[in-house]
């Protein structure tokens, strides 16, 4: 691999882990801020310039939209793990073969998830008990944004590959472009063309499509190490097997989480559009604040993947300790902001005269703030385990979290009304953390990896 190109892609197997994690996560953090910003523009434009019903119609799709996005993320996350491990092992041929297979998997995922979203949008919204005054907007939003998710899936695949080789800056540049374009299109479709919910949906898809095409073109030109040729394109069963061994459990994990959110959404919908709107506002504030530490946790999968591929297992443990310290400080800051400024944050999305929505939003924000340490911890441990290819414990973690959310959303809402709903997900974070922590500390993954390497070294010596 050419040194001139590796200068723009961080080698996470060498150097101070804290410094590397900060350098790698900063562009991802900036990108998430821009992504959240343009997502918030959707919400602000609808809530302040269209109607509370338009805001709620998009908010009612949050769990359904997340289900399809999380399913697609199983593909891109698996690809990033395989590429990072091949890159860490300095196996250029395997890198190119993995990128070629990324094309196949992305095309297949786009077709399957897109068709499923388009045809299931209406029955799913009705199954969730979406209030009649917002259901048409919800169906429209899902059919456009998820039915045409080929745009977002190709962008995420390209961005995941670039991050896997240590380049987190390039995806940032194209995400900024996507954000600015989406904001401009939001304003054009909603304020000038009066397209409402459909307008913000089309703005999102068009912005994602433009960014994905430009990002792929740049990646192909900038990194010859990623350019596969005809010899790398034949389908390999071993590589497909590795992909499905990682993507399959991750897909199951993401779908189980989504099912939990669907159940919670139905419970929320039963309280009416005001509570749906409050949940939308609270969720947006959570996303806005947690971005300060989420990307440090998420980026650890690439750090762990590269070091696992390089067989630098000790650096994984060292990196976990450094990441834990960094996350602790960021989470403390996030909790303080959410607890002290819950009302001003909620007012970013709704007008002050919408008292019921505002009050419920503030309550949700403050409850979730208390549980942020558990959220950060579960993100970090699961990212580490995914990076080393140990996805089964993360599935168990998700199942525990799912069952907790379902049971608690039904139980607590019957006891405390909408207040009980706000507790369901945070308590699920606490309970879901246990399986991942136990496996990391007591699962023996490092000893097995070392034993495997020693056995392979012995076989090589015997063969020579």
Image (spheres, rainbow, N blue to C red):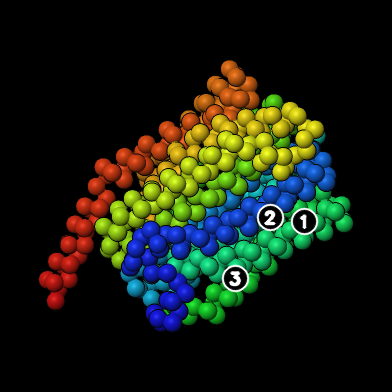
At x 55%, y 80%, the residue is 221
| Residue 61 appears in view | yes
| Residue 248 appears in view | no
The Cα–Cα distance between marks 1 and 2, rounded to whole angstroms, is: 9 Å
The Cα–Cα distance between marks 3 and 2, rounded to whole angstroms, is: 18 Å
Looking at the image, do the residues carrying marks 1 and 2 touch, with CB atoms under 8 Å apart? yes
Which disc number belongs to residue 38?
2
- In the depicted structure, whether residue 131 falls above or below residue 51: above
Q: Which one is nearer the viewer's eye here, 379 or 213?
A: 379
Q: Residues within 10 Å of mark 2 (few under 14, many from 20)?
A: many
Q: Is residue 399 left or right of residue 180?
A: left
- In the depicted structure, whether residue 415 falls above or below residue 425: above
Which disc number belongs to residue 186?
1
Q: Would you name the residue on which mark 3 appears? A: 215
Q: Horizontal and vertical percent for residue 234?
A: 45, 73
Q: Horizontal and vertical percent for residue 310?
A: 30, 66
Q: Secondary structure beneath disc 1?
A: helix
Q: Horizontal and vertical percent for residue 446?
A: 25, 53
Q: Horizontal and vertical percent for residue 18?
A: 38, 58
The Cα–Cα distance between marks 1 and 3, rounded to whole angstroms, is: 22 Å
Q: Nearer the viewer, mark 1 or mark 3?
A: 1
- To which quarter of the image does residue 159 belong? bottom right
Q: First in sequence: mark 3 or mark 2?
A: 2
At x 54%, y 57%, the residue is 29
Q: First in sequence: mark 1 or mark 3?
A: 1
- To which quarter of the image does residue 269 belong? top right
At x 58%, y 56%, the residue is 32
At x 58%, y 60%, the residue is 31
């Amino acid at each position: 691999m050419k040194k001139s190109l590796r200068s723009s892609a961080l080698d996470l197997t060498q150097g101070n882990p804290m410094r590397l994690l900060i350098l790698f996560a900063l562009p991802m953090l900036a990108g998430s801020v821009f992504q959240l910003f343009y997502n918030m523009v959707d919400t602000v434009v609808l809530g302040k310039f269209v109607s509370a019903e338009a805001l709620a119609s998009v908010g009612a799709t949050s769990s359904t939209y997340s289900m399809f996005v999380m399913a697609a993320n199983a593909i891109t996350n698996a690809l990033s793990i395989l590429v990072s491990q091949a890159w860490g092992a300095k196996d250029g041929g395997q890198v190119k073969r993995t990128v070629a297979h990324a094309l196949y998997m992305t095309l297949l995922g786009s077709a399957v998830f897109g068709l499923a979203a388009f045809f299931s949008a209406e029955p799913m919204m009705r199954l969730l008990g979406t209030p009649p005054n917002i259901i048409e907007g919800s169906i429209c939003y899902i059919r456009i944004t998820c039915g045409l998710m080929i745009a977002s899936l190709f962008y995420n695949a390209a961005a995941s590959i670039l991050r896997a080789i240590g380049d987190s800056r390039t995806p940032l540049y194209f995400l900024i472009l996507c954000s600015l374009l989406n904001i401009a299109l939001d304003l054009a479709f909603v304020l000038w063309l009066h397209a409402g919910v459909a307008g913000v949906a089309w703005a999102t898809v068009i912005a994602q499509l433009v960014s994905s095409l430009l990002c792929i073109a740049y990646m192909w030109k900038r990194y010859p190490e990623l350019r596969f040729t005809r010899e790398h394109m034949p389908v390999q069963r071993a590589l497909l097997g590795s992909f499905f061994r990682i993507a399959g459990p991750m897909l199951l994990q993401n779908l189980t989480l989504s099912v939990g959110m669907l159940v919670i959404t139905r419970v929320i919908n039963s309280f009416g559009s005001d509570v749906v709107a409050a949940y939308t506002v609270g969720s947006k504030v959570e996303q806005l604040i947690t971005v300060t530490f989420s990307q440090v946790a998420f980026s650890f999968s690439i750090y762990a993947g590269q070091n696992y591929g390089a067989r630098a297992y000790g650096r994984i443990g060292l990196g976990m300790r450094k990441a834990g310290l960094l996350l602790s400080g960021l989470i403390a800051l996030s909790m303080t902001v959410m607890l002290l400024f819950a009302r001003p944050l909620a007012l970013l999305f709704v007008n002050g005269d919408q008292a019921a929505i505002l009050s419920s939003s503030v309550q949700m924000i403050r409850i979730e703030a208390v549980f942020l340490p558990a959220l950060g911890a579960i993100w970090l441990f699961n990212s580490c385990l995914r990076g080393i290819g140990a996805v089964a414990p993360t599935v168990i973690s998700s199942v525990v979290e799912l069952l907790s959310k379902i049971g608690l959303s039904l139980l607590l809402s019957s006891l405390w009304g909408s207040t009980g709903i706000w507790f369901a997900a945070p308590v699920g974070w606490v309970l879901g953390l246990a399986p991942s922590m136990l496996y990391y500390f007591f699962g023996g993954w490092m000893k097995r990896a070392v034993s495997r390497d020693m056995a392979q070294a012995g076989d090589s010596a015997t063969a020579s």
